[in-house]
């Protein structure tokens, strides 16, 4: 079984990933399983750029496959802010509460409350090369005050137009079904399943080719040894079993 490190220092994200990956045949690890590393710079202009930077950085240092997530909240009335700066909106070391308070203050007189969460995921192999990327988004409205105790970050300020409730009120299962991260994770899992199916298909094709080559060689040898054709055909049990290629599961966004 392979290892995948969930390379995030955000415990809220980590819990969501653990829940969503629990059925996968992979050994999940997190940064706490390794000696501490300084955080990488997240100064990219897009979520995708930051996710790739983090995945590559951790994969190279830990010599493992690493999954990184860069995500944040885009508020329409603020021109997409806090966006990639979501974690540092109220300062480099800002807490969730400080970020939320600043956001509410900036939105005090705004009538348009449309916003969305976005998430970019990147997986890097142990050399640091990016081997998979996906993304997801989740639409909502910014509340005027915190609602509910669940989730993390900006969740208490986010009214989900898909769930018709605040993310702070939603259970983990409800949030994962509609969230930016949930959508990005399901795309990633669908990609892995497709790649695994293709690999199985290729392996079976190779086995089939090997069998047919062997048959030709054996046939030739038998002919040279004087074996008759009907005798060879009467041995179907020597055929390798070639299962039909199974279809990947449809994406469930
Ligand atoms: O209410 C929320 N529900 C979410 O589902 C969610 N996803 C992201 N965020 C916020 O966006 C920033 C991400 O910044 P970010 O991607 O740099 O992560 P981070 O610095 O916390 O950890 P790391 O993964 O970089 O180690 C942080 O402020 C998070 O609170 C969320 N807030
Ligand atoms: Mg970060």
Image (cartoon, rainbow, N blue to C red):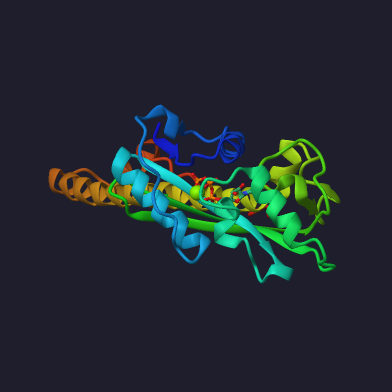
Q: Nearer the viewer, residue 226 or 38?
A: 38
Residue 247 seen in this snapshot? no
Where 215 falls versus 135 (above or below)? above
Q: Residue at x 63, y 64 (%)?
A: 81
Give x and y (percent) for residue 6: 47, 39
Quadrant placement of the C terminus: bottom right
Q: Nearer the viewer, residue 232 or 90?
A: 90
**Where does residue 53 sit, x and y in percent of width and height?**
39, 55
Q: Quarter holding the N terminus?
A: top left
222, above or below 44, in the image: above
Taking the image as shown, residue 168 lies to the left or right of residue 35, namely right
Residue 57 visible in image: yes
Quick one: 142 or 243, which is closer to the camera?
142
Q: Residue at x 21, y 45 (%)?
A: 218
**Picture residue at 70% right of the left edge, 60% below the top:** 116
Compared across the picture, whether 248 is left or right of 221 comes to right
Looking at the image, the residue that sits furthest to the left is 224
Q: Name the residue at 44% across, 60% down.
A: 43
Give the mark count.
0
- Across and down, in percent, residue 3 comes to 40, 34
Between 64 and 47, the one lying in front of the other is: 47
Q: Position of residue 41 (x, y in %)?
A: 40, 53
Taking 55 as reference, is 146 left or right?
right
Seen in the image, is 157 located left or right of residue 227? right
The quadrant in which residue 95 appears is top right
């Amino acid at each position: 079984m392979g290892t995948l490190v969930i390379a995030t220092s955000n415990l809220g994200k980590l819990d969501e990933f653990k829940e969503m990956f629990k059925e996968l045949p992979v050994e999940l690890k997190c940064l706490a399983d390794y000696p501490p590393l300084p955080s990488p710079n997240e100064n990219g202009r897009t979520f995708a750029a930051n996710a790739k930077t983090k995945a590559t950085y951790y994969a190279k240092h830990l010599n493992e496959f690493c999954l990184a997530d860069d995500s944040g909240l885009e508020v329409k009335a603020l021109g997409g802010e806090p966006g990639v700066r979501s974690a540092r909106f109220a300062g480099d070391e800002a807490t969730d509460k400080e970020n939320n308070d600043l956001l509410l203050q900036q939105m005090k007189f705004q009538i348009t409350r449309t916003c969305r969460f976005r998430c970019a995921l990147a997986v890097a192999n142990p050399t640091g090369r990016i081997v998979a990327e996906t993304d997801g988004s989740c639409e909502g409205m910014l509340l005027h005050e915190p609602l509910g105790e669940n989730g993390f970050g900006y969740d208490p300020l986010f009214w989900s137009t898909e769930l018709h409730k605040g993310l702070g009120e939603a259970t983990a299962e409800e949030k994962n079904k509609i969230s930016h991260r949930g959508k990005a994770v399901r795309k990633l899992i669908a990609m892995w399943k497709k790649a695994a199916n293709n690999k199985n298909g290729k392996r079976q094709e190779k086995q089939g080719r090997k069998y047919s080559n062997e048959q030709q060689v054996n046939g030739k040898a038998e002919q040279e040894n004087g074996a008759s054709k009907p005798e060879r055909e009467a041995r179907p049990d020597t055929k390798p079993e070639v299962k039909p290629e199974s279809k990947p599961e449809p994406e469930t966004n």
